[in-house]
Image (tube, rainbow, N blue to C red):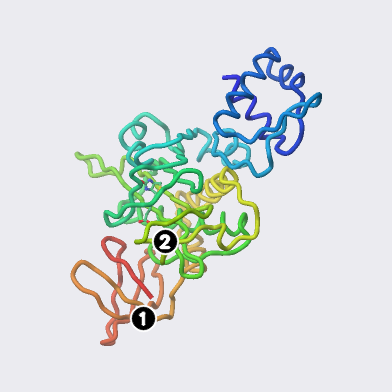
Amino acid sequence: MVRDSVLAVLENNRGCIISGGSLAKQLGVSRTAIWKAISALKQSGFDIEAIAGEGYRLALDNDILTDSGIQMFLETKNIGQNLQVLDSVGSTNTVMKQQFADKKPEGFVLVADHQTGGRGRLGRAFHSPAGVGIYMSILLKPKLALDKINFLTIAGAVAVCKAIAENAGFTPQIKWVNDVLYDNRKLCGILTEASLEAETGMLSYIVLGIGINVHNSPLPPEVSEIAASLSSFSGKPLLRNQIAAAVLNQLEVCYTQILDGNYSALLESYKSHMAFLGQKITVHSPQETYAATALDINQSGHLVVLKDDGTHETLFSGEISIRL
Ligand code: BTN
Protein backbone atom coordinates (compact mmCIF):
# COMPACT_ATOMS: atom_id res chain seq x y z
CA MET A 1 0.00 0.00 0.00
CA VAL A 2 1.24 3.50 -0.87
CA ARG A 3 0.23 4.68 2.61
CA ASP A 4 2.63 2.23 4.30
CA SER A 5 5.45 3.02 1.89
CA VAL A 6 5.02 6.79 2.42
CA LEU A 7 5.04 6.24 6.18
CA ALA A 8 8.20 4.14 5.99
CA VAL A 9 10.03 6.90 4.08
CA LEU A 10 8.82 9.60 6.51
CA GLU A 11 9.80 7.44 9.48
CA ASN A 12 13.26 6.88 8.05
CA ASN A 13 13.60 10.66 7.73
CA ARG A 14 11.76 11.64 10.92
CA GLY A 15 11.97 15.39 11.60
CA CYS A 16 13.19 16.17 8.03
CA ILE A 17 11.17 17.64 5.17
CA ILE A 18 10.69 15.32 2.18
CA SER A 19 9.15 16.81 -0.95
CA GLY A 20 6.06 15.28 -2.54
CA GLY A 21 8.00 14.94 -5.77
CA SER A 22 10.82 13.01 -4.14
CA LEU A 23 8.32 10.70 -2.39
CA ALA A 24 6.50 10.10 -5.69
CA LYS A 25 9.78 9.33 -7.47
CA GLN A 26 11.10 7.02 -4.75
CA LEU A 27 7.88 5.04 -4.64
CA GLY A 28 7.08 5.14 -8.37
CA VAL A 29 3.59 6.62 -7.90
CA SER A 30 1.86 9.92 -8.77
CA ARG A 31 1.96 13.02 -6.56
CA THR A 32 -1.81 12.68 -6.17
CA ALA A 33 -1.30 9.19 -4.74
CA ILE A 34 1.22 10.67 -2.28
CA TRP A 35 -1.19 13.43 -1.28
CA LYS A 36 -3.98 10.86 -0.69
CA ALA A 37 -1.65 8.69 1.38
CA ILE A 38 -0.59 11.68 3.52
CA SER A 39 -4.25 12.62 4.10
CA ALA A 40 -5.05 9.04 5.16
CA LEU A 41 -2.07 8.99 7.54
CA LYS A 42 -3.09 12.31 9.10
CA GLN A 43 -6.61 10.97 9.54
CA SER A 44 -5.18 7.96 11.38
CA GLY A 45 -3.52 10.36 13.83
CA PHE A 46 0.00 10.71 12.43
CA ASP A 47 1.48 14.12 13.16
CA ILE A 48 2.61 15.06 9.63
CA GLU A 49 3.26 18.67 8.84
CA ALA A 50 2.75 19.90 5.24
CA ILE A 51 5.12 22.78 4.52
CA ALA A 52 3.96 24.79 1.51
CA GLY A 53 6.34 24.57 -1.43
CA GLU A 54 8.68 22.22 0.46
CA GLY A 55 7.06 18.93 1.41
CA TYR A 56 6.07 16.80 4.37
CA ARG A 57 7.62 16.16 7.78
CA LEU A 58 6.79 13.52 10.40
CA ALA A 59 7.07 15.14 13.85
CA LEU A 60 9.99 13.94 15.98
CA ASP A 61 7.72 13.09 18.89
CA ASN A 62 5.03 11.36 16.82
CA ASP A 63 4.53 8.17 18.80
CA ILE A 64 2.32 5.79 16.88
CA LEU A 65 3.26 2.12 16.80
CA THR A 66 3.83 0.88 13.25
CA ASP A 67 5.47 -2.07 11.52
CA SER A 68 7.94 0.13 9.64
CA GLY A 69 8.62 2.27 12.71
CA ILE A 70 9.65 -0.79 14.72
CA GLN A 71 11.55 -2.38 11.84
CA MET A 72 13.66 0.75 11.46
CA PHE A 73 15.29 0.08 14.84
CA LEU A 74 15.39 -3.70 14.56
CA GLU A 75 18.84 -5.32 14.49
CA THR A 76 17.78 -8.94 14.76
CA LYS A 77 18.29 -11.86 12.41
CA ASN A 78 14.96 -13.45 13.20
CA ILE A 79 12.88 -12.16 16.12
CA GLY A 80 10.49 -9.46 14.84
CA GLN A 81 11.56 -9.70 11.20
CA ASN A 82 8.04 -10.98 10.66
CA LEU A 83 5.89 -8.53 12.59
CA GLN A 84 2.33 -7.23 12.68
CA VAL A 85 1.02 -4.17 14.52
CA LEU A 86 -2.69 -4.04 15.36
CA ASP A 87 -4.73 -1.14 16.70
CA SER A 88 -6.80 -2.96 19.26
CA VAL A 89 -7.16 -6.61 20.28
CA GLY A 90 -8.53 -8.53 23.24
CA SER A 91 -5.15 -9.96 24.20
CA THR A 92 -2.10 -10.32 21.93
CA ASN A 93 -1.26 -13.63 23.68
CA THR A 94 -4.73 -15.02 23.00
CA VAL A 95 -4.78 -13.86 19.37
CA MET A 96 -1.29 -15.27 18.86
CA LYS A 97 -2.37 -18.67 20.19
CA GLN A 98 -5.70 -18.75 18.34
CA GLN A 99 -4.74 -17.32 14.96
CA PHE A 100 -0.99 -17.40 14.40
CA ALA A 101 0.90 -19.94 16.52
CA ASP A 102 0.47 -22.86 14.11
CA LYS A 103 0.84 -20.87 10.91
CA LYS A 104 3.63 -18.43 11.62
CA PRO A 105 7.30 -19.26 12.01
CA GLU A 106 9.40 -18.80 15.10
CA GLY A 107 10.20 -15.15 15.76
CA PHE A 108 6.82 -13.78 14.59
CA VAL A 109 5.74 -10.82 16.74
CA LEU A 110 2.28 -9.38 17.28
CA VAL A 111 2.11 -5.86 18.71
CA ALA A 112 -0.99 -3.91 19.77
CA ASP A 113 -1.59 -0.30 20.69
CA HIS A 114 -4.51 -1.29 22.93
CA GLN A 115 -5.83 -4.46 24.58
CA THR A 116 -9.42 -4.74 25.73
CA GLY A 117 -8.71 -7.94 27.67
CA GLY A 118 -5.00 -7.85 28.52
CA ARG A 119 -4.11 -10.85 30.67
CA GLY A 120 -1.59 -11.07 33.50
CA ARG A 121 -0.14 -13.84 35.66
CA LEU A 122 -2.27 -15.70 38.18
CA GLY A 123 -5.46 -14.94 36.20
CA ARG A 124 -5.18 -11.20 36.76
CA ALA A 125 -6.07 -8.53 34.19
CA PHE A 126 -3.37 -6.35 32.64
CA HIS A 127 -4.49 -2.73 32.16
CA SER A 128 -3.66 -1.91 28.52
CA PRO A 129 -4.97 1.53 27.45
CA ALA A 130 -4.46 2.95 23.93
CA GLY A 131 -1.59 5.22 22.92
CA VAL A 132 0.61 4.78 25.99
CA GLY A 133 1.98 1.26 26.17
CA ILE A 134 3.55 -1.58 24.23
CA TYR A 135 1.64 -4.85 24.33
CA MET A 136 3.36 -7.58 22.37
CA SER A 137 3.59 -11.33 22.00
CA ILE A 138 6.57 -13.16 20.59
CA LEU A 139 6.19 -16.63 19.09
CA LEU A 140 9.07 -18.99 19.89
CA LYS A 141 9.50 -22.64 18.92
CA PRO A 142 12.64 -23.80 20.70
CA LYS A 143 13.69 -27.40 21.16
CA LEU A 144 13.88 -27.08 24.90
CA ALA A 145 13.38 -29.42 27.84
CA LEU A 146 10.25 -28.49 29.78
CA ASP A 147 12.25 -27.75 32.93
CA LYS A 148 14.07 -25.00 31.03
CA ILE A 149 10.96 -23.06 29.93
CA ASN A 150 11.34 -20.60 32.81
CA PHE A 151 14.52 -19.34 31.14
CA LEU A 152 12.37 -17.81 28.38
CA THR A 153 10.58 -15.68 30.96
CA ILE A 154 13.96 -14.78 32.43
CA ALA A 155 15.16 -13.80 28.93
CA GLY A 156 12.10 -11.56 28.52
CA ALA A 157 12.71 -9.76 31.82
CA VAL A 158 16.42 -9.23 31.15
CA ALA A 159 15.70 -7.99 27.61
CA VAL A 160 13.15 -5.46 28.89
CA CYS A 161 15.55 -4.16 31.58
CA LYS A 162 18.34 -3.67 29.06
CA ALA A 163 16.04 -2.03 26.51
CA ILE A 164 14.77 0.40 29.16
CA ALA A 165 18.30 1.22 30.29
CA GLU A 166 19.28 1.95 26.65
CA ASN A 167 16.30 4.15 25.89
CA ALA A 168 15.01 5.70 29.09
CA GLY A 169 18.30 6.39 30.84
CA PHE A 170 17.65 4.44 34.04
CA THR A 171 18.14 0.77 34.89
CA PRO A 172 15.13 -1.02 36.33
CA GLN A 173 15.16 -4.11 38.52
CA ILE A 174 13.40 -7.45 38.30
CA LYS A 175 11.10 -8.65 41.04
CA TRP A 176 11.21 -12.45 40.89
CA VAL A 177 9.85 -13.98 38.72
CA ASN A 178 9.52 -11.36 36.04
CA ASP A 179 7.99 -8.05 37.07
CA VAL A 180 10.15 -5.15 35.95
CA LEU A 181 10.23 -2.41 38.58
CA TYR A 182 11.74 0.94 39.26
CA ASP A 183 11.46 2.65 42.62
CA ASN A 184 9.20 -0.23 43.67
CA ARG A 185 6.70 0.55 40.91
CA LYS A 186 5.87 -2.00 38.24
CA LEU A 187 6.72 -0.83 34.70
CA CYS A 188 6.27 -4.07 32.81
CA GLY A 189 4.66 -7.47 33.19
CA ILE A 190 5.49 -10.69 31.38
CA LEU A 191 3.19 -13.63 30.74
CA THR A 192 4.75 -16.75 29.20
CA GLU A 193 2.38 -19.38 27.86
CA ALA A 194 3.39 -22.79 26.53
CA SER A 195 1.63 -25.28 24.32
CA LEU A 196 2.57 -28.96 24.53
CA GLU A 197 1.95 -31.72 22.02
CA ALA A 198 -0.61 -33.99 23.62
CA GLU A 199 0.93 -37.25 22.38
CA THR A 200 4.60 -36.64 23.00
CA GLY A 201 4.43 -34.10 25.81
CA MET A 202 7.01 -32.08 23.83
CA LEU A 203 6.91 -28.32 23.61
CA SER A 204 5.19 -27.15 20.43
CA TYR A 205 5.44 -23.41 20.97
CA ILE A 206 5.85 -20.61 23.50
CA VAL A 207 4.07 -17.26 23.48
CA LEU A 208 6.10 -14.69 25.39
CA GLY A 209 3.78 -11.78 26.21
CA ILE A 210 5.30 -8.47 27.29
CA GLY A 211 3.38 -5.39 28.42
CA ILE A 212 5.28 -2.14 29.07
CA ASN A 213 3.78 1.07 30.44
CA VAL A 214 5.64 3.72 28.44
CA HIS A 215 3.69 6.97 28.90
CA ASN A 216 1.58 8.19 31.81
CA SER A 217 -2.14 7.48 31.82
CA PRO A 218 -4.77 7.33 34.55
CA LEU A 219 -4.44 4.01 36.36
CA PRO A 220 -7.31 1.97 37.79
CA PRO A 221 -7.44 2.12 41.63
CA GLU A 222 -6.23 -1.48 42.07
CA VAL A 223 -2.87 -0.71 40.43
CA SER A 224 -2.43 3.04 41.01
CA GLU A 225 -0.22 2.42 44.07
CA ILE A 226 1.98 -0.24 42.49
CA ALA A 227 2.38 0.62 38.79
CA ALA A 228 4.06 3.46 36.93
CA SER A 229 5.29 4.30 33.44
CA LEU A 230 8.78 4.80 31.98
CA SER A 231 7.89 8.49 31.44
CA SER A 232 7.49 8.98 35.21
CA PHE A 233 11.20 8.29 35.68
CA SER A 234 12.74 9.28 32.36
CA GLY A 235 13.62 12.78 31.28
CA LYS A 236 13.99 11.61 27.68
CA PRO A 237 11.44 11.65 24.86
CA LEU A 238 10.36 8.02 24.51
CA LEU A 239 9.34 6.41 21.23
CA ARG A 240 7.39 3.19 21.56
CA ASN A 241 8.61 1.88 18.18
CA GLN A 242 12.21 2.29 19.31
CA ILE A 243 11.62 0.68 22.70
CA ALA A 244 9.71 -2.26 21.20
CA ALA A 245 12.57 -2.87 18.75
CA ALA A 246 15.16 -2.57 21.54
CA VAL A 247 13.32 -5.25 23.54
CA LEU A 248 13.30 -7.56 20.51
CA ASN A 249 17.00 -6.86 19.83
CA GLN A 250 17.92 -7.71 23.41
CA LEU A 251 15.58 -10.68 23.47
CA GLU A 252 17.33 -12.24 20.51
CA VAL A 253 20.66 -11.99 22.37
CA CYS A 254 19.18 -13.68 25.48
CA TYR A 255 17.29 -16.27 23.42
CA THR A 256 20.50 -17.20 21.60
CA GLN A 257 22.17 -17.76 24.97
CA ILE A 258 19.38 -20.22 25.81
CA LEU A 259 19.62 -22.03 22.46
CA ASP A 260 23.41 -22.25 22.90
CA GLY A 261 22.93 -23.72 26.39
CA ASN A 262 24.75 -20.71 27.85
CA TYR A 263 22.40 -20.43 30.81
CA SER A 264 25.05 -19.09 33.15
CA ALA A 265 25.51 -15.90 31.08
CA LEU A 266 21.76 -15.27 31.10
CA LEU A 267 21.49 -16.01 34.83
CA GLU A 268 24.30 -13.59 35.54
CA SER A 269 22.39 -10.76 33.83
CA TYR A 270 19.18 -11.83 35.57
CA LYS A 271 20.81 -11.80 39.00
CA SER A 272 22.47 -8.46 38.35
CA HIS A 273 18.99 -6.91 37.89
CA MET A 274 17.31 -8.82 40.73
CA ALA A 275 15.53 -6.75 43.38
CA PHE A 276 15.16 -7.83 47.01
CA LEU A 277 18.17 -10.19 47.27
CA GLY A 278 19.33 -10.11 50.87
CA GLN A 279 16.09 -8.42 51.93
CA LYS A 280 13.11 -9.52 54.00
CA ILE A 281 10.15 -10.51 51.83
CA THR A 282 6.71 -12.03 52.25
CA VAL A 283 6.03 -15.15 50.19
CA HIS A 284 2.46 -15.78 49.05
CA SER A 285 1.75 -19.30 47.81
CA PRO A 286 -1.67 -20.94 47.43
CA GLN A 287 -0.96 -22.93 50.62
CA GLU A 288 0.59 -20.34 52.90
CA THR A 289 1.95 -16.85 53.42
CA TYR A 290 5.21 -16.51 55.32
CA ALA A 291 8.09 -14.15 56.02
CA ALA A 292 11.55 -15.01 54.67
CA THR A 293 14.79 -13.52 53.42
CA ALA A 294 15.45 -13.64 49.66
CA LEU A 295 18.87 -15.28 49.41
CA ASP A 296 19.81 -16.18 45.87
CA ILE A 297 18.78 -17.30 42.39
CA ASN A 298 19.93 -20.90 41.85
CA GLN A 299 21.23 -22.45 38.62
CA SER A 300 17.70 -23.28 37.52
CA GLY A 301 16.58 -19.66 37.90
CA HIS A 302 14.55 -20.41 41.03
CA LEU A 303 14.51 -18.18 44.09
CA VAL A 304 16.10 -19.57 47.26
CA VAL A 305 14.76 -18.09 50.49
CA LEU A 306 15.61 -18.50 54.17
CA LYS A 307 12.47 -18.92 56.24
CA ASP A 308 12.29 -17.33 59.67
CA ASP A 309 12.41 -20.84 61.23
CA GLY A 310 15.93 -21.26 59.75
CA THR A 311 15.00 -23.64 56.90
CA HIS A 312 15.73 -23.02 53.25
CA GLU A 313 13.03 -23.15 50.58
CA THR A 314 13.39 -23.07 46.79
CA LEU A 315 10.54 -21.26 45.07
CA PHE A 316 9.36 -22.26 41.59
CA SER A 317 7.48 -19.64 39.62
CA GLY A 318 4.02 -21.28 39.49
CA GLU A 319 1.50 -19.72 41.78
CA ILE A 320 3.90 -17.88 44.04
CA SER A 321 4.34 -14.13 44.39
CA ILE A 322 6.60 -12.16 46.69
CA ARG A 323 6.37 -8.71 48.29
CA LEU A 324 8.79 -6.60 50.23
C1 BTN B 1 1.66 -9.72 34.66
O1 BTN B 1 2.12 -8.65 35.03
O2 BTN B 1 1.00 -10.45 35.42
C2 BTN B 1 1.86 -10.14 33.24
C3 BTN B 1 1.31 -9.14 32.27
C4 BTN B 1 1.54 -9.52 30.83
C5 BTN B 1 0.91 -8.53 29.89
C6 BTN B 1 1.23 -8.81 28.45
S1 BTN B 1 0.70 -7.52 27.40
C7 BTN B 1 0.97 -8.49 26.00
C8 BTN B 1 0.52 -9.88 26.34
N1 BTN B 1 -0.90 -10.05 26.11
C9 BTN B 1 -1.57 -10.26 27.22
O3 BTN B 1 -2.79 -10.41 27.31
N2 BTN B 1 -0.74 -10.29 28.27
C10 BTN B 1 0.63 -10.08 27.85
Q: Is mark 2 within 8 Å of ligand 1?
A: yes
| Residue situated in front as seen by the camera: 107 or 239 | 239
**Does residue 127 sit above or below 222 in this rendering?**
above
Q: Which residue is mark 1?
A: 293
What residue occupies the far right of the structure in this picture?
Answer: 53
| Residue situated in front as seen by the camera: 128 or 280 | 128
**Does residue 292 sit above or below 266 in this rendering?**
below
Q: Which residue is mark 2?
A: 179
Mark 2 or mark 1: whose residue is earlier in sequence: 2
The 10 Å Cα crowd at callout 2, few under 14, some 14 to 19, many 20 or more, is: some
The amino acid marked with disc number 1 is Thr
Relative side of 33 to 135, left or right: right
**Residue pictured at 71% horizontal, 15% vertical:** 31
Residue 296: x and y, percent? Answer: 41, 74
Residue at disc 2, secondary structure: strand
Q: Quadrant of the N terminus?
A: top right
Q: Quadrant of the C terminus?
A: bottom left
Instruction: Name the mark on residue 314.
Output: none
Residue 323: x and y, percent? Answer: 36, 72
Residue 55: x and y, percent? Answer: 76, 26
Relative side of 127 to 242, left or right: left
**Residue pictured at 42% horizontal, 61% vertical:** 179
Residue 232: x and y, percent? Answer: 55, 61
Q: CA distance from mark 2 to mark 1?
A: 19 Å
The 10 Å Cα crowd at callout 1, few under 14, some 14 to 19, many 20 or more, is: many
**Does residue 76 sit above or below 222 in this rendering?**
above
Relative side of 233 to 192, left or right: right
**Does residue 185 sit above or below 106 in this rendering?**
below
Residue at disc 1, secondary structure: strand
Q: Are marks 2 and 1 in contact (CB under 8 Å)?
A: no
The amino acid marked with disc number 2 is Asp
Q: Is mark 1 within 8 Å of ligand 1?
A: no
